[in-house]
Amino acid sequence: MCHESSGSALGDTIGIGKGTVTLNDFYNTDVIIIMGQNPGTNHPRMLTALEKAKNNGSKIIAINPLHEAGLMGFKNPQTVKGFIGFTTQLADLYLQVKINGDMALLKAIERMLYEAELENPGEVFDHEFIKNSTVGYTQFLHHLQQHSIEELATAAGVPVRQIKEAADMLKNKKRIIVCWAMGITQHKNGVATIHEILNLVLLKGSIGKPGAGLCPVRGHSNVQGNRTMLIFDKPTPKQLDKLKEVFDFEPPRDHGFDVVETIKAMNEDKLKVFFSMGGNFLSATPDTTYTAKGMRKMKLTVNVSTKLNRSHLVHGEESIILPTLSRSDKDMIGDEAQFITCENSMGVIQSSKGILSPISDDLLSENQIICRLAKATIGHRTVIDWDKYEKSYDAVRDDIAKVIPGCDDYNKKVRQPGGFYLPNAPRDGKFKSKDFGGKVPFTLTDIPEHKLADDEYMMTSIRSHDQFNTTIYGLDDRYRGIHNERRVIFMNQKDIQRAGFTAGEKVDLFNYHNGKERIARLFVIVPYDIPERNTATYYPETNVLVPIDSVAEKSNTPTSKLIFIKIKKHIP
């Protein structure tokens, strides 16, 4: 089983792999820290939530290598003021960190908070929480003092005075929420940086309290929901035992493959069949040429898809495309409209019912496709009643309720307005870290060092405002002033001049990880407010540059947010 690695370290430290805040916390907090994401392009609805939080008195600290228009001037089209052109500056403080400078920045803020605590003992850190709920505090403080604030500020690329502003905003507050996304997870030290985020929250006791906690923002709306429903390559023995108990069969105990392992297995002739439920695997994954090579080695490729995409053009010896209903389509079984459920970043499971007429009466839902495949292949030797599942989604949810913790009375609870929250122990101040007696350990992390050659740059991948994952709706990016083009590279003006380039010049991009040349051709240089030696390009156009063996430690997530590149003039 292949599944997207979340890069979350929460499961290792507090017993869950999801956030610890509710929407009510979000709207009633003192400080929100936004890291590794641009809500305007990645999660537009989040801008509305941030606006509401700000109107309720929250302060917002934005941390990003690119100055993003959405956080500096937001027009909410759902309000009268927004509709007629009034803007809201969401970010009270914008810290323009270097790519992968987040770890150093967090440590610098912690150092300043520690110095403030020394001056005012008991007023900055939550010592009662630290004593009762954590371990390793003394060792953490010792480790924290290995670097000076000036060294940390230089590594982060943020002036000391701005870091002090951030520390001052935090030092007398306990209701703090930290949000992060793929700009944090898709680095070699992504998991370690999440541990450092947790360190900051532990110092302040900002977890398990109203208006405080952690909020990892996923790549799309239901990544966490898939994981909750055991769509995971490494289910636990306890989860597998429950499946055996409920369905009376012995589930495989061997681990499956994550995305990177799947691509390698394809190329190493360890796989024969590739079956994709939704998505655009070729475009979404790293090292595009290597991935395509592996895909062509398959005996059979099957794509269950709502629309055509590039993955359908690169396939195995035999290829099958199974069109399916989209989430927005009416899903009728007989005279009864079905609905699906999904889980958001707050751990809320909600219903979702399509309202559009399907483009064809012959389209099947994903559920129907799977049930019919099961009946055609294993139906004669299984105890599962696939007909029951095919005819009613309520039947599927009834059996989910028997397997997944917190999903009891699933069909009743999901029909309530707003759905229902899954259990979340840290929300109640309880932790499942068995190795530490139910307490949370402070983690000792190291600052990464990046040594660039004279002609080398760090590149991060980003989305345009009119893009949902690999689905691109247009060639304009109104947040960054780009029109009718996507093959652009954002560069600091000083870097452009230093390298002898000019704005608008056409260039090719190269990566030489482990001595292998990877090329992304024909990009246009765009001057932008971004730190020197840092660049940004749109995803998925530069996935070809992401090495298959450049991954985050522990999570094995591709390092799409930090790639080392060289830039050369394009030769037609």
Image (cartoon, rainbow, N blue to C red):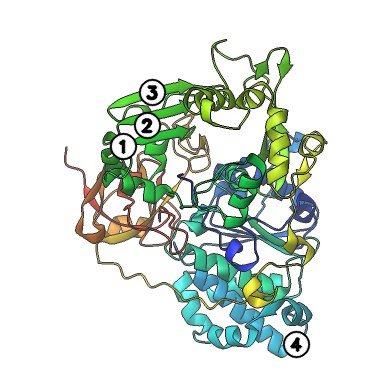
Q: Residue furthest left?
A: 571
Can you give x and y, in whole percent of width and height, for residue 259 in the image? 42, 47
Question: Helix or strand or loop: what does disc 1 sit on?
Answer: helix
Can you give x and y, in whole percent of width and height, for residue 555 in the image? 47, 59
111 and 370: which is toward the camera: 370
For residue 8, side relative to residue 137 (left or right): left
Q: Residue furthest front?
A: 381
Cβ–Cβ below 8 Å for labels 1 and 2? yes
The structure residue drawn at horizontal position 70% and vertical position 85%, both measured from the top left corner, is: 117
Q: Dot 3: few (<14), some (14–19), or many (≥20) neighbours within 10 Å? A: some
Q: Amino acid at mark 1?
A: Met
Q: CA distance from mark 1 to mark 4?
A: 61 Å
Q: State the mark number for residue 311.
A: 2
Q: Provide the residue designation for mark 3.
A: 320
Q: CA distance from mark 1 to mark 2?
A: 9 Å
Choose mark 4 or mark 3, whichever is in front.
Answer: 3
Question: Helix or strand or loop: what does disc 2 sit on?
Answer: helix
Q: Dot 4: few (<14), some (14–19), or many (≥20) neighbours within 10 Å? A: few
For residue 306, side relative to residue 358 (left or right): left
Q: Provide the residue designation for mark 4.
A: 120
Cβ–Cβ below 8 Å for labels 4 and 2? no
Choose mark 4 or mark 2, whichever is in front.
Answer: 2
Q: CA distance from mark 2 to mark 3?
A: 11 Å
First in residue order: circle 1 vs circle 4: 4
